[in-house]
Image (cartoon, coloured by chain):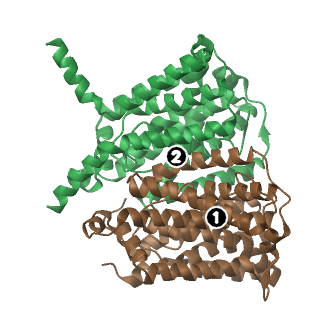
């Protein structure tokens, strides 16, 4: 009895993208155990977990946007704007109790700009966020004139300093964000609306979901989460500048996509996103441990992303075929 | 079928906006209408123009190419390696073109034959190609190119830079490909409705493969011109070009979902960017603000284009 339900569970989950990702991780783990056993030392593992915090927080937001059938290439610019703003205000002597809420509000506000352009002006998401990325980054660089903020306020420094056995506050925040996101995606109306709207905006409209609600929720939540990520980004780095996090949005999108989210919307999971982030970060750390030249890190990351795309494509093609048959009939 | 006239309003809007801007810039700066200014402008415009033409085909076929800038980098450092080994100039140029072509063929295989999503494939291959470009160049920049290669930058025909003339010639070829060849017809058909194209017996895989190979080839050409103008080659050379090209195509009014393409509109789009950027430079607008303002130009013209076109029924 027990074993048959177990095998049914296995069969049901065998084809899932998450299973493939987990096996990929396992393979990487075995390879690392042979090639670089130091990877599994507690110090190295703590470093790995710490390096995942910011990416995981922003990726949870990006998952919302991709689930809604959108994309946001302005996330890196938003991260830079918020981190510079926060550090500058903090260095002017404003207390954390003022700066941190202001930082989150700024992120949410910039996300809202994207949402307005996409929802009200009907600009396609990739174009809208391409434009705002240039706008935000350009204004930020003009404001900073390329100068570094080489010191950060003491309270921000203490946020980024490791405690609890090498882990820092970003890990705790990432865990909380993932739990909250899981609750919102699966237990609230707005979460379900994201899936349904992303799967088919027309069908969603017929079931009474306004297109505004999921779009605004997705981009504002990504903005706010990017701002939260910016807090830890600046805290861990200890210095920020206007060109910070250039291209970061592509790493975030790569992680979410590697996690099996459908770029057309409506499909994706937090577990997959978590595994995608874990895979990217462990790969990067492993290559550093193996003292591999930087360009090999790029080549390996690109290859892993492509592998993830190929792995996640097979079941989707079946689904599309079914759709085609039903529409052509 | 959509009406042709209402579809093509956006290039008109952009042209009008840019003309207003030109009048203003000419009034404020005496150098704006000088021949030298337009000569200096034509060179980088041609480089971005090649990538934009390639991107036009990619977007028309319903895809997007995020790896274009990385391909330019691969082609540039390939030329650098060639020059380092003292290869003759034609060999350097052919090597750079082949490097671009191979990168494009890689994308085309994954997207056309394996039917993977273009945005995902090129996101991965962008990271991959930039790694390869770094590997080829070992992170260094190349200099000491032979005079025959740098010639591209100096050569002019009645004062018009040769690179720009080449761009115009290729634009004419692109327009002919689009309008008079079966392949051009296939590209539009695949972009408007891939399923219908497949049921109509069109060679979807081969069409898409051709689109990305052409894009790779044009990126290779951009790499050569970029190397000739800057007299150096680096792996990250094409970085800004990818977003520029997508923006230029969309600024011309092409729908990002594909199924429509116009060479004239793409020319308007890419020229608008460079003319406005150049004008802002002459008006002493700080460089970072220029960047921000060209982004605003993109957003405003796409938004007005949408408003003029009226409410579209299904919006993705």
Image position, residue B284 (x, y; %): 80, 67
| Residue at image mark 2 | B124
How far is mark 1 from mark 2, CA to CA? 22 Å
As drawn, the chain in brown is B
Horizontal arrangement in the rendering, residue A44 relative to residue A62 (left or right): right
Query: Pointer 1 indicates a residue of which chain?
Result: B
Mark 1 near mark 2, Cβ–Cβ under 8 Å? no
Residue corresponding to mark 1: B97
Residue at 70% in and 78% down: B164
Q: Chain of mark 2?
A: B
**Label 2 Cα neighbours within 10 Å, binned few <14 / some 14-19 / many ≥20:** many
In the rendered structure, the colour chosen for chain A is green
The answer to which image quadrant residue A96 occupies is top right
- Extreme bottom residue here? B158
Secondary structure of the residue carrying numbered label 2: helix
- Image-quadrant location for residue A170: top right
Quarter of the image with the N terminus of chain A is: top left
- In primary-sequence order, the first of circles 1 and 2 is 1
Nearest to viewer (mark 1 / mark 2): 1
Asked if A26 appears above or below A189 in the picture, the reply is above
- Secondary structure of the residue carrying tag 1 is helix
Q: Nearer the viewer, residue A149 or A51?
A: A51
Q: Quadrant of residue B36?
A: bottom right
User: In this rendering, would B88 be left or right of B57?
Assistant: right
């Amino acid at each position: 009895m027990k074993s048959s339900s177990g095998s049914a569970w296995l069969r049901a989950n065998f084809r899932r993208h998450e299973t493939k990702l987990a096996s990929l991780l396992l393979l990487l783990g075995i390879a690392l155990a042979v090639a670089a056993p130091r990877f599994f030392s507690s110090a190295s593992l703590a470093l790995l977990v710490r390096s995942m915090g910011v990416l995981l927080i922003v990726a949870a937001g990006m998952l919302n946007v991709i689930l809604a059938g959108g994309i946001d290439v302005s996330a890196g610019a938003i991260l830079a704007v918020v981190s510079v703003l926060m550090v500058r205000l903090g260095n002017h002597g404003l207390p954390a109790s003022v700066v941190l809420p202001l930082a989150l509000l700024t992120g949410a506000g910039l996300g809202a700009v994207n949402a307005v352009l996409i929802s009200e002006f009907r600009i396609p998401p990739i174009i809208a966020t391409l434009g705002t990325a240039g706008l935000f980054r350009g204004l930020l660089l003009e404001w900073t004139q390329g100068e570094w903020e080489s010191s950060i306020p003491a309270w921000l420094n203490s946020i980024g300093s490791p405690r609890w056995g090498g882990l820092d506050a970003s890990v705790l925040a990432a865990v909380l964000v993932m739990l909250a996101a899981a609750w919102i995606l699966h237990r609230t109306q707005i979460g379900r609306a994201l899936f349904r709207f992303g799967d088919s905006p027309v069908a969603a409209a017929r079931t009474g979901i306004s297109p505004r609600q999921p779009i605004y929720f997705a981009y504002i939540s990504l903005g706010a989460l990017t701002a939260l990520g910016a807090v830890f980004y600046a805290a861990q780095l200890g210095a920020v500048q206007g060109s910070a996090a250039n291209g970061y949005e592509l790493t975030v999108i790569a992680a979410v996509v590697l996690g099996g989210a459908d770029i057309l919307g409506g499909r994706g999971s937090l577990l997959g996103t978590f595994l995608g982030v874990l895979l990217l970060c462990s790969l990067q750390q492993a290559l550093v441990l193996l003292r591999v030249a930087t360009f090999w890190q790029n080549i390996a990351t690109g290859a892993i992303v492509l592998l993830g795309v190929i792995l996640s494509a097979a079941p989707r093609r079946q689904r599309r075929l079914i759709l085609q048959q039903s529409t052509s009939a | 079928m959509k009406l042709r006239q209402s579809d093509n309003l956006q290039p008109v809007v952009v042209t009008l906006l840019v003309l207003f801007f030109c009048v203003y810039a000419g009034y404020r700066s005496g150098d704006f209408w000088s021949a030298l200014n337009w000569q200096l402008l034509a060179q980088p415009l041609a480089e971005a123009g090649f990538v934009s033409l390639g991107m036009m085909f990619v977007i028309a076929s319903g895809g997007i190419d995020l790896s274009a800038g990385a391909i330019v980098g691969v082609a540039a450092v390939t030329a650098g390696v060639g020059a380092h080994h003292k290869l003759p100039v034609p060999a350097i140029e052919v090597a750079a073109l082949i490097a671009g072509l191979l990168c494009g063929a890689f994308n085309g295989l994954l997207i056309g034959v394996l039917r993977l999503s273009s945005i995902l494939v090129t996101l991965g291959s962008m990271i991959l190609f930039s790694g390869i470009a770094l590997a080829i160049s070992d992170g260094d920049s190349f200099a000491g190119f032979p005079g025959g290669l740098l010639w591209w930058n100096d050569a002019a025909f009645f004062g018009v830079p040769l690179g720009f003339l080449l761009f115009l010639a290729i634009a004419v070829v692109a327009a002919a490909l689009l309008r008079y060849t079966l392949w051009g017809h296939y590209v539009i058909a695949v972009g408007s409705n891939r399923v219908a194209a497949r049921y109509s017996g069109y060679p979807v895989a081969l069409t898409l493969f051709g689109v990305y190979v052409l894009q790779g080839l044009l990126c290779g050409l951009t790499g050569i011109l970029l190397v000739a103008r800057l007299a150096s080659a680096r792996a990250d050379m094409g970085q800004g070009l990818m977003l520029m090209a997508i923006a230029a195509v969309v600024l011309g009014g092409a729908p990002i979902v594909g199924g429509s393409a116009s060479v004239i509109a793409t020319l308007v789009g890419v020229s608008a960017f460079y003319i406005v950027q150049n004008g802002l430079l002459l008006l002493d607008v700080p460089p970072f603000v220029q960047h921000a303002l060209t982004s605003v130009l993109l957003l405003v013209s796409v938004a007005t284009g949408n408003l003029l076109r009226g409410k579209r029924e299904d919006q993705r």
